[in-house]
Structure formats: structure tokens, C-alpha cells
Image: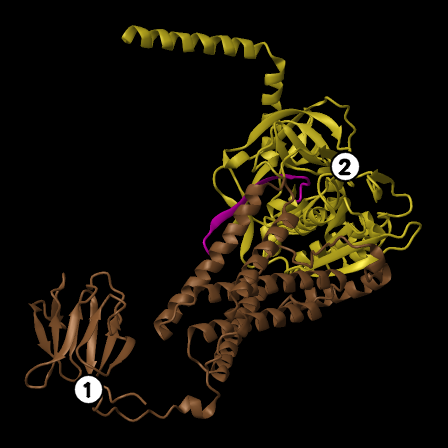
Chain colours: A yellow, B brown
Amino acid sequence: MAVSRTLVFLAVAWMMVVRSTAGAQTPATDLTSTVFRRFADQVIKIHVVETSSAATAELGSGFFVTGDGHIVTNYHVISKLVHEPTRYRAEWVEAGGATHPLKILAVDVVRDLAVLHAEHRPPKFFSLAGIAEPQGTRLYSLGHPNDLGLSIVEGTYNGLLQYTLYPKIHFTGALNPGMSGGPTITEDGRVVGINVSTEGNEISFLVPVERAAALLEKTRSPGYVSPTDELAEVGAQVRAYQDVYLDKLFGDSTPTVALGPFKVPTRPASFFKCWADATRSTSERPYEVVSHQCSTDDYIFLSEDQSTGVAELRHRLYTSNGLNALRFYSLYEARFASGASEMEGSETDVTRFECQTRNVRTGGRAPTTVRAVMCVRRYKKLRGLYDAMLRVAVLGHANSGLISTLTLSGVSFENAERITRRYLERIQ
Amino acid sequence: MSARPLLVIEVLDARGGVASRTRIDALPATIGRGYANDVVIDDPFVDPTHLRIVLDESGALVAEDHDSVNGLRASGSPNLVARLTLSHGAVLSIGRTSLRFYDPTESVVPALADARRLREEPSTEAAPAWLSSRRARWAAVLAAVAIQLASTYAGTVERATGAKLITAALALLLIIALWAGVWALAGRLATHRVSFTSHLALAAAAFAVGAMLNALAEWMTFLWPDGAVSAMLTLSANAALFAALLYGHLGVASSMGRRRRMNVSLVVIGALIALGGLFALADQEKFTTKMNFDEQLKPLSTRFVPTVSVDEFARASRTLRTAADANVSGQSK
């Protein structure tokens, strides 16, 4: 037994020697270590604390961007403070445990950014000058994953995402919870983006540094006063955002796609991603379904319970040779009632849905008779914003039917009405 | 006119009720299972001629055991006896049957005044008339099964197999049989009558009418999805149907008069509607992320479907904003 223990010890010791020797021969490891040493003290840990219990409710990262104590982080790191400023406070927690209060200067909820301020004069800070990197550039992401201490993650720059309204960087590297708000930098310390989200498997996303620079610039402009009601500011930003991206949706230039005997709109803008699928009929399931849907990749984080800013359209074509008209309409009715008749939300954030159904004769070049349902619910905390759903079933075909659903979250009622009207007109 | 009876013999049922009452005008009289007896008893434990009723030397009425297999006992006594003297109201047992003897010269108590009879017409025709026809009763059951089969077939979007249809039909039969069984039991307790098939027919007819009413309501909601009118009609029709069902069951299972049955039915329906209203109100206030809407889709040529224009639809949708805004309590609108 003692002999085998000694052998194991020797084997481990040998492996360590080999690894340390190999490490000494890899410049990248040295470089990472150098980057960490040079820039670690410019990255901070942010705690959002529940005031009455003094418990940490949210953990994130941030980094100094001026010598006056300006800090950039994500909006979602401090969203609790925005929603309930009397219940939460934000703190910068030093490695030794000392805490310093943080104040919100500005938020950009659409890009998930915030600029905070600490009464502290950091000796060093990151510059937010914009840079253009070629794909494959080695980057270093800094932050506090799961409160395990400041960490550095190596990864590569993989360009901007294709299907987003606002640019977002694809970073191949393992971002983890707690690193949000931290910087991703080049080896010489130039900030490329701000850590924001991950899809796992080293697929991570960064907010381009230009957006953070613009937000910082705004807070430093002469006469700038930070909003007294940050939540109202968040609402105003979402309203402005939806005005921009909904403006041209489903206009005359929107392409259409033929599904069976029907024509329906598809990919209404470049920032929509579309995909399709089909299931064939079997002896047990005597009908076919062709699905075609498009959705924005962008979404806006409002709080842990609520995201918004998503537009989605979903078409389902049902056809059957094995069902007579009565049975086919049982299927059609069941699918009309069920698919995607629910949207996430909590009672504190949104109202119940109010719905209305009518049989509608659409105008346009090829008038069509449809059963149309419009459902709307209002945001409780953000004035003038609604979630809306329009569902349409084309009537009058014995063995085929099309159910089309348009879902819009975080839109003004005027936009919901305008967009659903255009959408209805484009179903033929 | 018959001679003055010597005595009256009552055959009692298991619960002590009178199953039959026979006047005896001449003695000796015989009691037994045989058809030649003066009192015929349907009890396999009674001999063909079990008892003889005679006058003894003193002129008293006496019941004599006719050498029967199971003998003669005074009621409540385990001992067999060869003969018993019969007094007014005496009860004796033969086989598993009890007999009670009455002296016809004894007077009976005056009739009770029937308050209900003074207020209402008699309830002798309480049950719906069609229930008296056996053919009509089974026709109702068949109609219910046919409707169930048709609606299961129309509602099956996967392959419709015989097993699925038969299961649906059997499930319906089981449910209405259970329902009818409960009513039949209640009727048995209240009136000592068992009318299972009448209750079954009532339940089947109510199911058939209800299914047709709901199909009609669905079509109405499809054609005119404004909501309020068809919802009210559906509620009223279903309430009226359930009240009629209750009224019919009470007619078969109780001796209530028409007015009373109607009152009971209306009170029960009123209570159910109130309860349903309370639940609906509670449900309306409950938060949900689901969208509830009129989902009816029917295979009908679009020429016959009343429609509105896109503009009218958009205008009508504006009421949703008002409703959604009203749902925000304590918030600025």
C-alpha cells in the first residue's frame, strides 16, 4: 500500500514538473499572466445589497473608465437597484472586503450598459477608445465568476453578430455569471467590449465598447444630471427603441413566402432570423404541418422576471387528405387555441391579457377571410408599453389551414395597432 | 256487495311496509305459496300451504301451522309454535315473510289534512309523460350514444379507431348510469319505487340536448364572436336544461308537487350559477400569463361568415387598451 502511494505521489510530482516546464515554454500563458497583473486592479466587484438584510442580491463586475471614479458595468447587474432604489444599494467590494457606495449616473437598457460613480480616484483606468480588431484576435476577459475572485479568461474575437439590430460581439471564451460588466481587452489593455451574456460552450457575447464610450460621454457632458427616476428613463429608452425597429416592419417591401395555397410575410428586416420545418403525415397522424418562423435575436433585459423587445412571427400550415372537413377543423381549432398562447411575465410587471376575436375580411390585392384574435397586456411599471399578440386563422378551406401568429413585446399601443394592421393585410 | 270481512291480512315487506292487503270473508282460510290459497305469498321459504286460519272452540281466530318445513313464529320470537291466537295487530312470521292481522271492526284514525294537496294539483303525473314509454326511454339513451360517437369521431384528429369510439360511448354510458343510479337510490328511499331506466333516459336526453345546445353555441360564437350575447345564451340554455333535468329527476324520484319541484330546481340552479359566478369572478381577478379567446373555427364557406374590415377590427381592438389600462391598479394610466 505504502509503495503504491509513493508511486502515485511520484507520478503526480513528475506531471507537475512536466507541466511547469511546458508552461515556461508557452508564451501565451506568460502573456495572460502579464495581462492579469497589469489590469486586475482596474476591474472591480459589484454587489447589489438588499438593504434591510444586508444580503447580497446580485453580483457582477465593472471597471474604471476615468480617473474621477466612473465605472462601466451592465444594466442587468444593477437592475434591482433601478427597479427598487429604496430597497437595494450598490457597492464596490475590494479584495480585502472594504466596501464603497456606488451611484447610478446613466443606464442604457437596450445595450445593457450602466455608468456608475464611486468617490474614489483610481490610479489607473481603461480607455474606451474604439478599435477595430480582425477576427481571431486573442482577447482577455476579466471579471468575478460566481464570486470566486477576480479571474481572467482567454478567448478570441469572432466579429459582430449577424442578426441583431444593434451590434453585439461574438466572443469565443467561457464567460460565467458574475463576470457580467467586466471588460474584455486586448493584450495591451484596450477595451473591445463589455461582458454581457453567454450561450454556454464558449459562445459568449460582448457589448461593443463604442456604446459604453457614448454613454460615458453623455454623463460627462456639461450640465448632465442623472435621472431622478431611473425606471422612467428605462421605460423611455424602450419606447424609443421600439419606435426605431418597428418603423418599417411589414411595409410593402417585406418579402412573402408561399405556404400551400397561402402567402405570408417573412423576414421583415435584416435583424430577423428565420427557419422552417415540416412533419409528414402518418397512418396514426393523418395531417402535415409546415412551420415557418422568424424572430429577432435582440432582447432587452428589464429584470430577472421580465425581458422585452422581441418580435416574432410564426406560421403553421396544416393540410390533410385523411381527415374530412369536420375532423380537420377540430384539429385546426385545437391548434388555433393552443400554440404559443402564453407569454412569460409576473404579476408585479404586467397585467392579464385582454383579448378580442373577430372574423375579418382583409383588403388589399387578394382579400382573405380570417379569424383574427388580438391580445394585449400592459406593463405595470413602465408607462406606455404593452405586449401584443395577433393570431390569425385563414377560413374557407376544407382540408388546409394557415395559423399565423405575430408577437410583439414592449411596444406602444399605437405601434401594436399599426404593425398588426399591416401584418393582417399581408396574409393572403 | 261483499260480506263483512272477518279479518284483514297484511303481507309486510322487508322494511315493514305493506306489500299487499287481503280481506278474508270466510274461514278456514289458507296462506301459502300455492296459487289456491286465500293469501298467496312469493317466498321460497314458505310452503305451498303453510298456514290455516280457523276459529277455535271459544270463537277466537287462530293461525295453525300446516306441518310446514320452516314453521310458524310470533314476530320477534325465535321459537316455533304449532298455533297462535290472532289478536288485532298481531304479527307472525312464516318463512322469511311477516304477516299482520287486523280486525276489520276496529276503527282507523281519521285522514290527515294534506297541505300540499290544498295548494297544488296532485303529483300523480309527476314524471314527464314520455318516460312512461319504454321505447322513448331507450331512444333517449341511443340518441345520447349516437351523439357521443359522432362528436368523438369529429373531434379525433389522430386515426379514429373503433376502440376509441367504443371507449367514448362506454364512458358516457357509465357516467349517466352512475348518475341515474344515484337518483334511483334516492327515489327508492323516498318513495319505495326504483325507476332506474327513467332516470337513465332523463340523463341521456339531457346529455343529447346539452351537446346540441353547445354545438349551436359554438357555431354562434364562431359566426358572431362578440362574446356577450352567445355567452349569455349558452349560460341561459345550459341553466334551463339543468333545471329541467333536476325537475324531471325529482318528478320520478319524489312525491313533490310541480310547483315545489320547480322551486327546488330553480333554487339549485340559482345557487350553482351564483357559485359559478363567484368562481369566475375569483378567476377573473387571478393573474395569468395565458391568453383566453374565442377559438372556434368551423368548416363553412366564407360567403356565409359575417366579417368586419381591418379598420373595424383595429378600431375594436382599441377597447383592449382601455381594458388593459384599467387592469393597472394604483398606477398612472
Whole-percent x, y for residue A168 in the image: 73, 36
Per the rendered image, the range of residues in magenta is: A52-68
Q: Residue furthest right?
A: A365
Q: Is residue B53 left or right of residue A340?
A: left
Whole-percent x, y for residue B145 in the image: 56, 55
Which image quarter is the C terminus of chain B in? bottom right
Residue B103, numbered circle: 1
Name the one closer to the observer, B136 or A263: B136
Q: Assess whether residue B8 is covered by the magenta stretch.
A: no
The residue tagged with tag 1: helix, strand or loop? loop
Q: The disc numbered 2 marks a residue on which chain?
A: A
Whether residue A6 is situated above or below residue A34 in the rendered picture: above
The residue tagged with tag 2: helix, strand or loop? strand
Distance from Cα at disc 1 to Cα at disc 2: 101 Å
Name the one closer to the observer, A112 or A103: A112
Whether residue A366 is situated above or below residue B128 in the rendered picture: above
Q: Amino acid at mark 2?
A: Lys
Which image quarter is the N terminus of chain B in? bottom left
Q: Does any portion of residue B231 appear in the rendered image? A: yes
The residue carrying mark 2 is A273
Name the residue: 51% across, 73% down: B248
Name the residue: 65% across, 31% down: A204
